[in-house]
Image: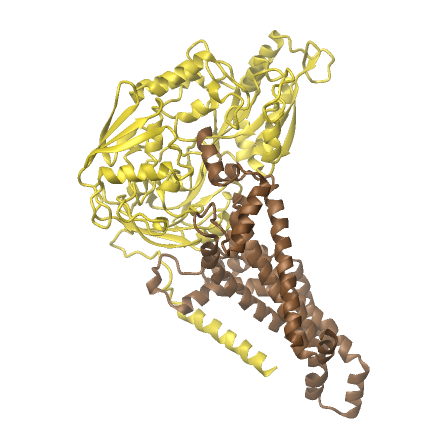
Chain colours: A yellow, B brown
Amino acid sequence: MKKNYLLLILSIVIMLLSVTSCSNDSGDLTNVVNENETKDTIVMAIGSEPDEGFNPIYGWGRYGSPLIQSTLVETNANMEIVGDLATDYTISDDSLTWTFNLRENAYFTDGELVTADDVVFTYEKAKESNSIVDLTVLESIKAVDEFTVQMKLSRPESAFIYSISKTGIVPEHVYDNEYGEKPIGSGPFKFVQWDKGQQLILEANEEYYGNIPEMKKVVILFMEEDAALIAAQTGTLDVAMTVPSMSSVEIEGMNLYSADTIDNRGITLPVVSNEGKTTSEGYPIGNDVTSDIAIRRALSYGLDRNKMIEDVLSGYGVPAYTEADNMPWFNEDCIIEYDIENAKSILEETGWIDSDNDGIREKDGLKAEFSLIYAAGDSVRQGLALSASNQAKDLGISIKVEGLSWDEIDKRMFRDPVLMGWGDQTPMETYMLYHSSNKGVDYYNPENYSNEIVDKYMEQALEATDSQIANELWKKAQWDGKTGTSTLGDSPWVWLVNIDHLYYVKEGLDVGQQKIHPHGHAWPLAANLRDWKWIK
Amino acid sequence: MNIFKYIMFNFSRMIILIILVCIVTFTLVVNSPIDPIRQYIGEGNTVSIEQRGEIEKYWGLDESKIDRFINWSSNLLKGDLGESLIFRKSVISVISERAINSLFLMVSAFILSGMVGYILGLIMGKYRDSLLDKIIKSICITFTATPTFWVGILMLIIFSVKLKIFPIGFSVPIGITTDNINILEKIHHAILPIITLTLVFVPNVAMHTRSKTIEVLQSDYVLFAIAKGESEKSILKNHIFKNTVLPAVTIQFGSFSEIFGGSVLAESVFSYPGLGSTVVQAGLGGDIPLLLGTTIITAIFVFMGNFIADILHMAMNPMIREEKV
């Protein structure tokens, strides 16, 4: 018994001690700033850490920017390709040989020059990493001289430049298996410390060849949204990622910042009818209702996207019309108006009529009825699916909503519509979603869509050696005046919304001009961290 | 010699248990509806079919389930838990990196909740049906019914947001490099999660000890001792303590596994880097080697807990010693 008392007393003493020792707040970055100097530090909670560490070879920096490493080229706020490590690049007439001329004044933070060898090393290493870094199109890469790199592609793929813009260059001379835990790069920020599962500490790279960041010290905390919300309320954070369901909380001294995205959601509609065919795994293909283009178009015109945004996303979103709204390769002709009368007349004209007055239209004895599947556990998808189902009733189309695991969705997505989402910052996504070579493959094209004319445009876009020309061709794939993948054309998807990404941001922090964010919510906000500043 | 036999017997039981745990976990993981490749690539990432195939090969998903199990278990016999797929380093290093933090939380909470719970139980038993007993009992029942993460969030709101006494989580101060951190700061960061876990596990021991104490106080031998004029102190020492401490220890060691589970939740609320978050990542990411590795370690851990309880029993209670040996 005595011992117990002793231990108890001891632990109480320790508690008291530690409380007093930390009450002077020596341990935390204080947010107190002198009257006459601007703050130059930032603390943020923006999602989770990369499991493999900060190693571009395994995919670090593909959502946003690698920060610590620099890339050959990068995308600016308008998603145009601009030089970074490479000052310029040329593509051969057959679209297969890409030559990059490197700047000669880039140094890794250990003082070594960045040369063509480092680039070759990075790409060769990444190619064999079996990771998210997809370099399958890259056949070979070699250093022509100290500052010239030449890539050979196995097939034309102009969109590969967007992949290059996300691949940070690592130093060959210090690279080892532990690299991701103590990375050295030539980017705007220098790695200081990583406490696994907790925080990453960076400082401005004063030797950087570009504009030296104004944020001299950056702390990125890894915490769940609810923990981040609590932390923000204590005034510890300058930026905290949040979600619509939590965004009603007012935090003193912070504003809600909502970023535009292509984090889209839409419905895949099988375009082939059910002829009893199955996939190689034996899953049924085709849907007699959605294979009628009138149904697909009527849904596109007859679903009120703005109502969905209000009801499901608390207003944080914008209507979506294609997979790539507002990207340089987006065709603005594809924007349509919500028009329920138009939707109804499309159905009437094609013979979808409710003759037995049960509220559901029929055509040749077939009821306008189908299942809509979403990934169970995702409340936003559930909300959108239910909203679509409710609104479709007014059109005389009956949609049965089902939440299933991905496992089950895999088996049914070739027959039943699915509520899915994409949003990668590359036109390659357009190719993957609509090209006939992906017909009936995986999640990309479960609707079995194919269109020869669209195929042609996309192939030409990949062969284009000029991004302007490529973008024009991607636009044509969406709608060329006669056909395309959008609602005006074949409408294999009904795109519904782009979901805004929300962050609490301290008053007086300028996060610069943001790119349109991709599907991943968190890191993209910090892609332009080097442009952030505190405004007095 | 007999004790040695007993230990060997238990040790072989543990081996059998681990083998069973391996088989069951493996079966569950490979048949789970989570597609590890899909989890790894994430949505909205355009990775070509070709590259997906490469990743599948690298993760060994192109082999049959039986082959995968044989590969993995034969490596295990060599003492190699394999490579974590998502962390891309050996499972041993991932676990050892994080186990220290978790153990610190768990062991502290384990000892603290055991002691506090036991003392509260004694008090409640001794003054049963008094106002004090009723208050402590209500608190215990409340915390029994409250989920760990909720207690954690309340703690954060009270002590970090409102009172600003404790940090908002993590095991180290924010934005400070390692060489500027002292041990007191680390303890300071661990206090809230430890208190949270302790609060959740106190009721278990406390309520149990309460009923045991009442049982002992109503027994004939205590009545006899009182009649004999034995002092309160001596009754407490010779009768109550001796008859209630063993069950309390057993209960406490028996809840080893729950403490592990509770720490997973507490770690997520307090952004505390431990095994808990690793298990969650491994499970959701379909990282089979890491998940199996952590499961084995946990199984050994829980088994050892029960085993220690057994040994303690033997050491403390001559009756059991006679029986067992």
Q: Residue at x 69, y 84 (%)?
A: B236
Whether residue A501 is situated above or below residue B302 in the rendered picture? above
Q: Residue furthest right?
A: B220
Residue displayed at 61% across by 29% down:
A411
Q: Is the residue B188 above or below the residue A278 in the image?
A: below
Q: Is residue A405 left or right of residue A197?
A: right
**Residue A95 makes an appearance in the image:** yes
Viewer-proximal residue among B263 and A341: B263
Residue A80: name its quadrant.
Answer: top left
Q: Nearer the viewer, residue A335 or A222?
A: A222
Q: Residue furthest bottom?
A: B229
Look at the image and tell me in which quarter the C terminus of chain B lies.
Answer: bottom right
Q: Looking at the picture, does residue A281 appear above or below residue B110?
A: above
The answer to which of B153 and A107 lies nearer the viewer is A107
Viewer-proximal residue, B26 or A106? B26
Looking at the image, is B75 positioned above or below residue A393? below
Image quadrant in which you'd find residue A140: top left
Spot occupied by residue A533 in the image (x, y as percentages of width and height): 29, 44
Horizontal and vertical percent position of residue A479: 43, 14
Q: How many marks?
A: 0
Answer whether residue B46 is visible to the viewer in this image.
no
Task: Report x, y in % for residue B50.
Answer: 45, 29
| Image quarter in which the N terminus of chain B is found | bottom right
On screen, residue A441 versus residue A50, left or right, reads right
Q: Is B126 positioned to the left or the right of A86 in the image?
A: right
| Residue B100 screen position, x and y as percent | 48, 62
At a point 28% along the width and 29% down the height, the residue shown is: A151
